Amino acid sequence: MQELSTIFLRLAGIEKESIVDGYGLRYVIFTQGCPHHCKGCHNPQTHDFNKGYLQDLASLYDEICKNPLLQGVTFSGGEPFMQAKNLSILAKYIKNLGLDITIYTGFTYEELLQNKQTKKLLFLADILVDGKFILEQKDLSLKFKGSANQRIIDIAKSLEQDKIILLEK
């Protein structure tokens, strides 16, 4: 646990209880910094890599532990995979609590598999919502995603079957 107090994330904010950022009651970590700059982005204030604030992993982990009703933790942004190394460390602790992890990213699953560090975080996730937000494909009726091109991927099944398995819930 000492390790966590010396590792930091650059955050835009947190939401201690959410039911709109994945399945079940979730703790949501909004990372700061995003290279995608999607037109019509829901969180444009998270784009600048120099804004936001630093938060140590120990205090995030402690906050997550305080709520026994949580089903999981969501990493959103900004772009979480820009801080993949430190989020991977936190994700391991979260998984040890028996909580699931959902990650929202502008990268595609295929792109994340090409990089050692992003792949490490990807493999710790349970659900991945991938793909850039495309304003022309915006659809408010979609659950847990903003545009029709985005996919909700079951990571364990996708790895097991060596092909993308979409989550149907």
Image (spheres, grey):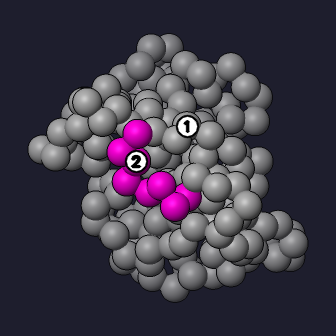
Q: Which quadrant of the rendered structure holds the C terminus? A: top left
* Circle 2: residue type: Cys
Q: Position of residue 117 (x, y in %)?
A: 75, 36
* Circle 1: residue type: His
Name the residue rendered at 52%, 41% in the picture.
Answer: 37
Q: CA distance from mark 1 to mark 2?
A: 9 Å
Q: Is residue 129 left or right of residue 57?
A: left
Check whether the beta carbons of the residues at disc 1 and disc 2 lie within 8 A of each other. Answer: yes
Residue 63 visible here = yes
Secondary structure type for disc 1? loop
Name the dominant secondary structure of the magenta segment: loop
Q: Residue beneath label 2, please?
A: 41
Q: Nearer the viewer, residue 27 or 39?
A: 39
Instruction: Determine which of the numbered discs, if any, sits on residue 36 in the image.
Output: 1
Which range of residues does the magenta coloring cover?
Answer: 39-46
Callout 2: few (<14), some (14-19), or many (20+) C-alpha neighbours within 10 Å? some
